[in-house]
Image (cartoon, grey):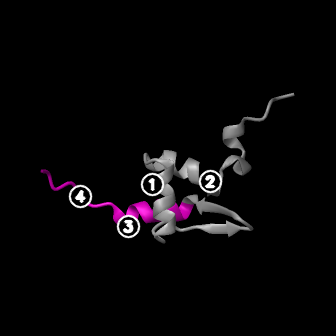
Amino acid sequence: MMAMNPSNDPLNERLLLGVSEAAVLLSVSRSSCYQLLLAGELPVVRLGRSVRIPVAALQKWLDDRTEPWAGL
């Protein structure tokens, strides 16, 4: 019997991130990520008292704020 490869499992693709996970992906501190959330900058999904950040919305948020390098 062949073992399942988790990288081929479509359910292995996460749709939502916790604040700490989003902070790591953005290379910012957890506090900075919470400040972005409180300012309404980052898109969120509320699940009860929990706050989650949709991966697709985070990618769009980054794409919308990415600008070409203009040098110093």
Cα distance, mark 3 to mark 2?
A: 21 Å
Neighbor class of circle 2 (other Cα within 10 Å; few <14, some 14-19, many 20+) is few
Nearest to N terminus: mark 4 or mark 1: 1
Nearest to N terminus: mark 3 or mark 2: 2
SS class, disc 3: helix
SS class, disc 2: loop
Neighbor class of circle 4 (other Cα within 10 Å; few <14, some 14-19, many 20+) is few
Cα distance, mark 1 to mark 2?
A: 14 Å
Cα distance, mark 1 to mark 3?
A: 19 Å
Cα distance, mark 4 to mark 1?
A: 24 Å
SS class, disc 4: loop
Answer with the quarter of the image where residue 67 lies. bottom left
Mark on residue 64? 3
Cα distance, mark 2 to mark 4?
A: 29 Å
Examine the structure image and report whether residue 68 is included in the region drawn in magenta: yes
Nearest to N terminus: mark 2 or mark 4: 2
Q: Amino acid at mark 2?
A: Gly
Residue located at (58% from left, 54% from top): 19
Q: Give the image location of residue 11, x and y in percent.
A: 73, 50
Q: Amino acid at mark 1?
A: Ser
Determine contact: label 2, label 4, CB under 8 Å: no
- Looking at this view, is 16 or 31 the one in front? 31
Looking at the picture, does residue 54 appear above or below residue 22? below
The residue wearing badge 1 is 32
SS class, disc 1: helix
Nearest to N terminus: mark 1 or mark 3: 1
Looking at the picture, does residue 32 appear above or below residue 2? below
Nearest to N terminus: mark 1 or mark 2: 2
The residue wearing badge 2 is 18
Examine the structure image and report whether residue 11 is included in the region drawn in magenta: no
The residue wearing badge 4 is 68
